[in-house]
Structures are given as C-alpha cells and as structure tokens.
Amino acid sequence: MSKPRRAALHRVPMRHPGDTAAIEALFESGALNPAAIVAILGKTEGNGCVNDFTRAYAVQSLSLMLVRRIGAAAAERVALVMSGGTEGGLSPHFLVLAVEPGEAPNPAGALAIGTGFTRDFAPEEIGRPPQAEAVAEAVRAAMAEAGIADPAQVHYVQVKCPLLTTERMAAAQARGATVATEDTYASMGLSRGASALGVALALGEVAAVPAAAIGRDWSLHSGVASASAGVELERCEVIVLGNSTDWDGDLAIAHDVMGDTIDLPAVHRALRAAGLPTEDGQVPEASAVRLVAVLAKAEPSSFGQIRGQRHIMWDDSDINATRHARALVGGVIAGAVGRTDIFVSGGAEHQGPDGGGPVAVIARRAPG
Amino acid sequence: MSKPRRAALHRVPMRHPGDTAAIEALFESGALNPAAIVAILGKTEGNGCVNDFTRAYAVQSLSLMLVRRIGAAAAERVALVMSGGTEGGLSPHFLVLAVEPGEAPNPAGALAIGTGFTRDFAPEEIGRPPQAEAVAEAVRAAMAEAGIADPAQVHYVQVKCPLLTTERMAAAQARGATVATEDTYASMGLSRGASALGVALALGEVAAVPAAAIGRDWSLHSGVASASAGVELERCEVIVLGNSTDWDGDLAIAHDVMGDTIDLPAVHRALRAAGLPTEDGQVPEASAVRLVAVLAKAEPSSFGQIRGQRHIMWDDSDINATRHARALVGGVIAGAVGRTDIFVSGGAEHQGPDGGGPVAVIARRAPG
Amino acid sequence: MSKPRRAALHRVPMRHPGDTAAIEALFESGALNPAAIVAILGKTEGNGCVNDFTRAYAVQSLSLMLVRRIGAAAAERVALVMSGGTEGGLSPHFLVLAVEPGEAPNPAGALAIGTGFTRDFAPEEIGRPPQAEAVAEAVRAAMAEAGIADPAQVHYVQVKCPLLTTERMAAAQARGATVATEDTYASMGLSRGASALGVALALGEVAAVPAAAIGRDWSLHSGVASASAGVELERCEVIVLGNSTDWDGDLAIAHDVMGDTIDLPAVHRALRAAGLPTEDGQVPEASAVRLVAVLAKAEPSSFGQIRGQRHIMWDDSDINATRHARALVGGVIAGAVGRTDIFVSGGAEHQGPDGGGPVAVIARRAPG
Amino acid sequence: MSKPRRAALHRVPMRHPGDTAAIEALFESGALNPAAIVAILGKTEGNGCVNDFTRAYAVQSLSLMLVRRIGAAAAERVALVMSGGTEGGLSPHFLVLAVEPGEAPNPAGALAIGTGFTRDFAPEEIGRPPQAEAVAEAVRAAMAEAGIADPAQVHYVQVKCPLLTTERMAAAQARGATVATEDTYASMGLSRGASALGVALALGEVAAVPAAAIGRDWSLHSGVASASAGVELERCEVIVLGNSTDWDGDLAIAHDVMGDTIDLPAVHRALRAAGLPTEDGQVPEASAVRLVAVLAKAEPSSFGQIRGQRHIMWDDSDINATRHARALVGGVIAGAVGRTDIFVSGGAEHQGPDGGGPVAVIARRAPG
C-alpha cells in the first residue's frame, strides 16, 4: 500500500503585497519544500474592491518567486487566491498549503486537501446553473482526490471563478447569446454565487440550483464555500479542505456558520470542534499556539440591520460596505482567537445566510 | 432624612443625526421626564474626525428639542456629548442619563451620577498640568455630588474639554504666553490627554501629572476616563458614573481595561462584574435584556502592531486610523454582547494603555 | 403701471454647514432685506452622497435663522437647495436669491426670478412621464411669474424633487401600483432625470418624454436644468432664472453647455455671453468683481472615458465617482473664473449630455 | 564632429498599473528602440499616499518587461519614476523618455535630456543642506551631460530621492548622529524639499540652502523642480530636461510657475512658450496633436485658502489633501489642454510657491 499524504499549512506575514520573503524563509529553514505547495491564499492590504491592485501585485510577486524556485511549469500549477482588505485590525498574511509525503494515516483523521477544475465556461454560462453544476462536479472530483467520501468531512471549499468582461459579453452577444448581467461588477457576485451554490449542490446543502435563485434567494447557501472572482481565468478552480483518515498529520479542520456578522458563538463552536478551548471568550495563549488558520466570509446584511439595529454600511459613501463588514467580522473573530492574521474575505453571496457566513478553523490537535 | 436619588439610563436608536424622535417617544410614553435629564451621549454616523458635522447637527437638534420641552435655561444644563463614527457594525444611538427621585437606597449599591465643572481655561493651560489639576478637582466635586467617596466605586468618567483654536492661540501669544501646540488638531489630543490624566489624578491612578508626560508617556493613564474635545466650550465638564449605596435603583456599573484592541477577556470581566453571564463567548438573550449600555474607547496602538502582528491602520491613507480602530473594537465588543448599539469612541490618549482602553458596562441587576 | 421688480443675488462664505453668520451680516449692513429672500442655494462640505448630513444640517440652521428673522410662515416660503461636496478647491458658500422692488425696467434686460410648484406626486409617478409633465407645467408657471415668454431667455432652472422612500414604495404597492424602481438611491437619479426632462419639455429642448427614455437615453437632455432630489418633499419646486426687460437691475444671466467635463471653451462662451472677458484663459481681476455666481453640473461620463482617454472615476472604490467629477469640473471652471466659490453639483441625469452639463454665469453688467 | 543626439518622448496609456503593453507596442511598431530608453515616468491610479502600492507594482512590471527586452544590466540604468494618484479626470499613463542618435543639431534648440546622480547619503544628511548641495552638484553634472550651460534653458528637473526608514534612523542613532525627523512620512517631505532646494541652488533660484529653511520657509523654492521620495534608493537621481541647440529634433520644452492651484494664466504662458495657441482657453485640436506632455506639481496651500476663499482639503478626513489638490490642478490644466493624460504629482515642498507649483510643457514645434 502506498504511503499516505500529509497536508501542511504555513501562515506567514507579509510586509507589503510584494513581499514573499517570509515564504522564502520557510524554504531556507527547510520547513517547507517549495515543490510541495499546492495553493497560496493571501490577505492583502488593498481595498478589496474594484481598484484593488494589491491582489495582482501579490500574484505577480508570488509567481516570480515560484518560477525562480520551482520553474514555470510547476509554478503554473499552484493556485494563488488573493483577498484584498485588512480593515480594522486584520493583519496582511499568506496561508501556504502544501501536500507532502506522510508516514502513516492518522486514524483520528487529518487535514486533507483536494483540487478540482471545471472546463472553461462560455460567457452565457457564468452566474447561471451550468456554472453551478460544473462546480459541483469539480468539488466531487476534488473530494475524490482528497480521499473524502462523506460531505460532512468537508469544512472549507475555496472556489476561484471567472467574471464577465466587456469582451466576453460582446463575444456572447455576437453569437446571439444573452449573458446573466451586462454589468461587469455585478457579474462577480453572480459568479461567486453560482460557484457557492455549486459547492452546496455537491455537498447536499441544496437539492438543486434554479436559475432564479442565483443572486436572489439567499435562503439557499453553502456553509463551507468561499468564492472569489478573478479576471484571469475562464474556468473555476476548486480547493477542498476536509478531514480524512487516509491522511497523515496532526492538523484538523472544523467549521461553523455565523448566522450574522456578530455571531461569536458560531466562532466558539468552530474553535471547540477544532479542539481549541476558550477562557473569558478567547483561546488562551497555551492553546493558541495550536491555531493554524481561521478563514471566514463577511458581508453586510442586505436588509440594513444586525439583530434589529440599523447598520450604516450600505449608506456610507466614503467607505465601501464590504470594508466595514470585514473590519467587523475581523473584530469578532480576533476577539475569540487573540490574533489578527485571520483570512476574512468579502463577497459572500450564497456563502452562509444573508449577513452571515462560514468560519473555518484549522488547528493542530492537542498532544495526547 | 431626604429621599434618595435614582439614576436612569435610556438607550434609543437614531435614524439620522438630527433624529430625536426616539427620545421624545420616551417622554410621550411617560418612561422619562425630560426635566430629569442630566446628559445625553450620542454615537453619530459621521467620520469621527475633523470634518464630522454629524456631532454639531445632533447637538443642534437635541438642543432645539430640549428647549421646546423644558425651556432654554434647563436645556442649557444638560450635557450633550456626541461621538462620531459608527464603523463596522456600530449602530447610531443615544444614551440618555437622568436623575429622578427614588424611594429607598439600594443597600447593594446602585448607579450614581455626579457632574462637575472646571473654571474656564486660559489657552496656555490647555493640554498642560493646570488643566489636569482642575479636572481632578472637578472629578472630586462630581464624586461628592454623587455621594461616592471610594475611587474604586467610580467606573466611568466622561470629560468634555476645550481645544485650542487659532483665535485662542493668538490671544495667548498677544499676551506673551506660549501654548502647548500650535496645531489645532493636535491640541484636541493634548486636551483629552490632560483631562484623562486629571481623572487619573483624582482617582489615585497616577500620583502626579508632569508636563512632559502629557501626550508622550502612555504608561500614565486612567482606566475609567473617556474624554472628548469640542470647540464650543472653554472649561471642562465632568460626568462621573459609579455605584453608591445612597442611591435607589437596580442599575449597576462595572468596568475593566482592555490591554489592546482585541482584549475580549477584559470585556468579559466587565460583563461579569456587572452581573452578566456569557455562553459561547456572548451574553445570552435571556440576560441581554438586562444590558443597558456599553461604553468603550478605541485607539490604534502607536507602535503599529497588535500582539506582534502588523496592523495597517496608520498606513491607510483612505480610511482614518481611528475609524479602523472603532470598527475593530466595536466588533470585539459586539461579539461579546450580541448587540451593536455600543458607545465606542476614539481618541484615547491616556485613557487606558497604548492601543487599549477602558470598557464600562451598565446593567440591570438580576432579579432575586 | 406697477413698479418693476429687481433680482438680487448675494454670494457669501460659510465657515461650516451650520454657519449662517455671513447671511445675517448682510441683514445687519442693510445690504439685504431678509423678507425679500426667495431662495438660498448652498454648497456644503459633505460628501454629496447618501450619508451627507451637511445638507440637512445647513437647512436646519438656515430655517432657524429665517424663522428668527422673518417668522415661520415667511421662512416656509424660502426655497432651500443644498448641494453637498466641495471636492478639489471648491469653497463652501451660500447663494442668496432675493426679489426686491425696483425703480425702472432695464431695457437691456435684467436677471429675473420665477418660482413654480407641482402638485404632490403619487409614488408611482416619480421618475416617470407624469412627473416630467408636471414639472414642465411648473416651469411654464415660473416663467410667467418671472415675466419671461421666450424660452431662449431662460438660462438656469433649479428643480428640487422628491424620491422614493421605502414607505412610499410600500404605500404604492399596497394599492397595487408599481414604482419606477425599488432602489431608493436609484429613485433619486430617476426623479432628477424626469425633472430635467420636464424642464426640457417646457423649453422645447425635447418634444416629448417617453417613459423608456428616463434614465436611459442620454441624448435627451436640458441645457439649463439642475435638479436635486430630497426626502423632505413630495412635489417638485422650480426656480427659473432668466433675463427679462420687465425687471430692474444690472445683473444678467447667460449659460452654455459643457460637452464633457473638460469643456473649458463652453465656460468661456458662457462668460463672454455674460459680459466677462478673459486674459490667458481667466477672467482678469478688474472684471472678476462683476462675476456674481457660477452654477454648473458635473457627472462622470458613463462610458468611462474623457475624449478617448480612460478616467478612473467609476472604478475607484475609495472616492465616489461624483466626488471626482465635482473636483474636476470645479478645477476647469475655477481656472476660468479665478475663484473657487462655484456652485458645482453632481447627479446630472438628463442635465446636459452624458459626461457634460450646463454651466450658468450671473454677472453684473459692465458700466457704461 | 560627432553626431548630435535626439530626445524622444512617448506618451502611452496604461489599462492598469501592471500594463506595459502600450510601451511594448512602440517597440513592435519600430517607433521606439527599447535600448534608447533613459527614463519612464508613470502616473498610476493609486491614492498617491502611504499605502499606494500601484507605484511598486508598476515598477515591478516595467522592470520585468525591460529585463526581458534589453537585459538586466541595461534595464537597471533606466530611471523609473512613478507618481500615484489620478484623481478627478486624470488618466493613467506612462511618459517614456529616450535618447537616440540624431542627424543635425536644431539651431532653434531641441529637447535635451541629462541625468546625474549623487553619492549615497548618510541618514543624518537626508532633508538637510548636505543633500541639497549634493543634488545641486548632480544637477550641474546632468546639465553638462545634456549640453546645457544656461540655467534659463532648464525647464524641468525630476529628482528621485531617498527617505528615512526606521532602520536607517536606528543606524544613525547607533552612531550618535541625529536625524532631521523621526517620522518616516515627514522625512519624505523633507527629502523632497531638500532636493528641490538643491535644484534651486544649481540654477541660481536661491543663493543658499540654510538648514532652518528646509520644510519651513516656502519663499525659497524652485520653479522647475519635481521631486519624489522612494524607499528603494539611498542616493538622489536627477533627470534634467531643457532645450539645447546641440540636439536634434522638433521637440521643445517650456515652463512657468503656477502661483496657486487655479493659476490658469501660468499654464497658458507655458503653452504659449512651447508654441501652442489657445482658443476659448483651450488648445484647439489642430494644435493639440503637437502637445507631447504636461508635467505639473499640485499641493494645497498651507494656509487653507485659495485667493482668500477657504478650501477644505486639510480638513477632509475621508480624502487626503494631496488627492484633492491633484484633482483640482488636473482640472485646471485639462481645461487648458483638452486632454487628461497629464502628469500631475503631489508633494510640492519647495517646488513652486506655497499652494502653487511648476508646470512644464513639451511640444512638437509647429512645422515651418
């Protein structure tokens, strides 16, 4: 029988969006083999909105570094997912995911990583059921690759998805096809939404994805999906994180769903499920060393309130609503974990309920 | 022997900075006698910085309403303290403090309110030891008025203080006097700082206020002071909130000091001291009805980090640092209390340690 | 025969949105009779967008002052039109319009002012042809009141118009009526657009206002309309400014239409038509004393370009597009007139062509 | 006798800060030999302030492209000067400066380019007279290289200068040296100011640079300097642009000094000196084709006014003052030239008078 795999996750700071030095230090110290990297998630300090170039800058810097280290072909295979916006106290950082050879499967279960890809989409498919269905298929493939059969063992699914550009819309229209929206920015939300519903479909969280529900019926959602749209791809890329008894290692992942932006109890449940205790609401230092990563989605409620009280996120013409939401959710989670390098991203269409979102915790199991 | 007093505190929403309807509804329903009001604190939805006119707009609107209800002379005596900035999920609201006739003193102690005033300051005194010393005296007077002898029973001291305007600086300089700073904006910080150190002096938190420490030596600070500077006054106005066995009522106040912006355990300690339990980090609904108000200070650490991790608050040229800080602290506290109408204000010079700040909780005692 | 009227226009600075002192100084000096005021336009230093409370604060301050000076009933009849946003170098100021008794009609023509009002609109009429038609009727009434028969003598029409609130939408829907949009913010643009097309209809700039054109077909527009939407009214209020040989005085108004945001030649043509020369592109000091007011509309082109070059106004998630546009148009006009207290307002739907807008100049005629 | 040189300047748009395609298209078309490039100036769409990463992203992208085209050593010699901020209508673009072999000297004078470098500075020299003196020497060297003897023939001097980082300050302090400021951000202004005064010294605009004047006495300034500070260098790099009868080509440069942000006549004088006429204030299309580049500095006046009227740039806590100033000056100049790809940069310490700044125009001479 073949050796099991072992998933590694390194969380390192960046001094600016072009700074890959902390990742390279992992190579120098021997802590990480660059060839083992499968994905890098980055929380960069831009505005997380339309004109946030910190994401592209970080991607270019990471690509250059990877090409130098492992060559262009291998670098090409590493998924780079940047999320802009470190409002409030959020601290810019990278999460580096790697798959290494393990020794023996962990019978208690260990973090498992699988990746999947859809075909390239026609512009008229984006933000519509065909996208969701293709994502569902890619999630199933990623689960298979990760050796996870039970949807309950999937705790986080990152999807990178395309958007509609003016060119792509024109191409579709030239063929007589109609697109889901003629607004480029709106297409990002629809694409994220369709992707999230695809995850929900694969995991049985929804039974079907009707066209009319995408971007409208927020009661349909996934509790583990995290989608981000980018102009640089025409297909969807899927990263599944879950637990598997086939994998080696002492990392485990758990998640819960925040019902709204201030749902600290959901964060506590996710921490507890990942084996992390709290004291006076916060993971104490002795246990905090075992916390490896927190990933969450933030979104202002569409109805303008949090538990019946008005929020001003949609009405503030100086600070974008998603920036308020990241600051807020970042504060709620930082209070619970006692640190600020948390991967909180915005744009949570169909990713958790309206105004809420999934929160996943990856932690090292407590020794014996 | 005379009847004891009873302190009341009403927390009501505002739909915009000029909206006093929810306060007036308290009058209509008989819940509040307008003549009993001693102070109104407001959290308005401006930027909380230089060009935040929501504060002046709210003050004008409240004054108009009070003059209509209780006449100009009585309205004049109500302290109006507006704090701008409802970043993240903070919800705009008013806290209305009133002193009413009570029935019998509460032997367990009840919320007590006292007010005090300094003389008008010469411009050259602002931001310097004479201001601090005069504030200390006013705090002692306010404590006496409230019937609180023990500094340990003082849990929140609001100070409204003056700032240096160009005119005031010129007047001082014409007399040959020098002022603490020639920068109007900087004078706000120095005036808040001197005020806070005055509170600390009165309560024995510091032994003396050396000129060189104001605005520099952040190790000197008060754990209960909350100061805000305004152009409309030349003296300091002090409101002391504490517990006294001379007062009637079932309200009680407690406080703690957040060591940094993400110090959720300090919030938990304050909640517990005020008789409020938490479950999974948050006050459960059954107890939350007893929570009346939370008042806290937020400030980015001057050294650019939170527990060793970089924050970007000082480097963000699009969102003012204090706006980030209010969003963050608002998130930490909202997570603990499960609501967002929390009075989080910025500008915390000498109000708690560098990067941290006081948090006070006012709650109704549990029955029985 | 009755005495002719004389229109007066005073331009005064404000130190903050609540500062009416410069207007009151006009009363004290005898330069202006408060009872003669018909309208006050204000350029306030808010963000000019959703959460700009400087407009309401200025309105409240002006109202208080007017009630104190001329009584509630007379104050009620003064139109107060506030436009937020003094980006770039724009300087906060008020334009006070008054109608006083004159001596003899000016055969060369003099500034004439007329006002008109529509009925209150049903919610389902807002942003639709019935609103435009009612505005057209009110414009004709205002022209009649001003004694202007020739549409070519109308150079500026200010319209204050209502918007759809959640309550108004609900009321309409309860009756089975549909509204033009369910988005409150979008309703402001539709109401401004319908108002501007109403002006165009009255002046013969368009032959009809088809429902499908409102908010869509920017080729239909008025070269003199300036509309602003406010929550405080349910009808439209119209102020017509033109020239009439029935009026006394040495003020005259002219206008032109900027084809895009950098159309300085259009500004020059308007200045020339108002009798103001330029040297090296700018009105020289000797003539500048005769310049009384400049009123203009600013809007980013919907197609993202200025003369073929990309602008970033729509893509900037930190500064609202209308803020960029006001700063830009303010700069173009300030360069021409050598001053910065210019009334540049945003939201130019159907007010000038896509990306452009009307510019009106009011000046004192050169002596002799 | 050796062949004369010919200076070329290409102005090309960028679609985003990482987009070098328009420059590469010049290579493909044969319009530009990449090996001839001496400098690339870029106007990128960031906020132009502390956390503007569009500059570093553009530099990284340009470097990658140049290395690919001309090799690392040659790429290293190209000066890359990025200025962030395209507020108002400013359009992101690159200005590519090249020196090519010419045919015959132009007796009327042609654009000439020279470059110079100082030694690396000790931290304690930055923002102080030694920096200014070294810059003066480098300017003289650059003039010599360009073959310009007469300071009156120098019309634009770009200086890239270092700043004080925390590390550099610590190094100086460890040696017992004091630095000009302990505030990193303030050091940028002092370094720019000292650089500008160095230019002024070289050109005889000032007789000396007293230490006390740097960053304080704005009456001392250069009418042609444009300085920008960057963390990536420890010396100053100087690019001198002027006219020389030793050079070939039909390009010529002229400049003037804007006395304040709305000094359109100064822009007109510069245009006229460069051979460009205006009609109704704007260069007409037929002449506009000869306009190659406009370079200007923008800065809010320190005294808060423009020609006696208040500006709100310093008081706006939502939009940085330099962003307002660039939008305004961009508007004034765009009105004059009828285009928006203008190189307007902020941070104008000692570059023109307080609130004003130099404006340079490069144009093709009119045929015959």
Image: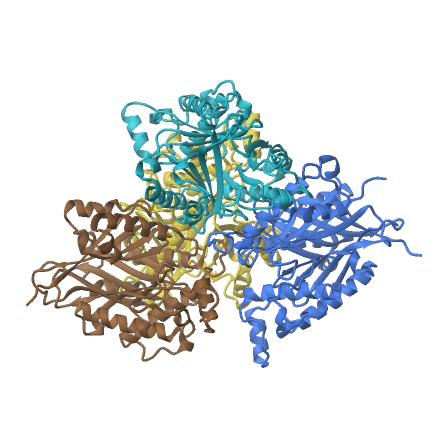
Chain colours: A blue, B cyan, C brown, D yellow
- Reply above or below: B22 against A175: above
- Reply above or below: D303 against D113: above
Residue at the image point whose x is 68% and y is 56% from the top: A80
D281 vs B356, nearest the viewer: B356
In the rendered image, the quadrant that contains the C terminus of chain C is bottom left
Q: Position of residue C64 (x, y in %)?
A: 28, 48
Q: Which quadrant holds residue B288?
A: top right
Q: Position of residue C76 (x, y in %)?
A: 26, 56
Q: Which quadrant holds residue D103?
A: bottom left
Question: In this view of the protein, can residue A207 be seen by the observer?
Answer: yes
Residue at the image point whose x is 63% and y is 69% from the top: A213
- Reply above or below: C57 against C109: above
Q: What residue occupies the far bottom of the structure in this picture? A: A176
C60 vs D105, nearest the viewer: C60
In the picture, measured across the screen, residue B111 lies left or right of residue A151, that is left
Question: In this view of the protein, can residue C221 be seen by the observer?
Answer: no
Residue at the image point whose x is 29% and y is 52% from the top: C340
A273 vs C269, nearest the viewer: A273
Q: What residue occupies the far left of the structure in this picture? A: C1
Q: Position of residue B69 (x, y in %)?
A: 35, 43
Q: What residue occupies the far right of the structure in this picture? A: A1
Q: Position of residue C300 (x, y in %)?
A: 41, 63
Q: Which quadrant holds residue C260?
A: bottom left
A83 vs D327, nearest the viewer: A83
Count of numbered circles on the image: 0
In the rendered image, the quadrant that contains the N terminus of chain C is bottom left
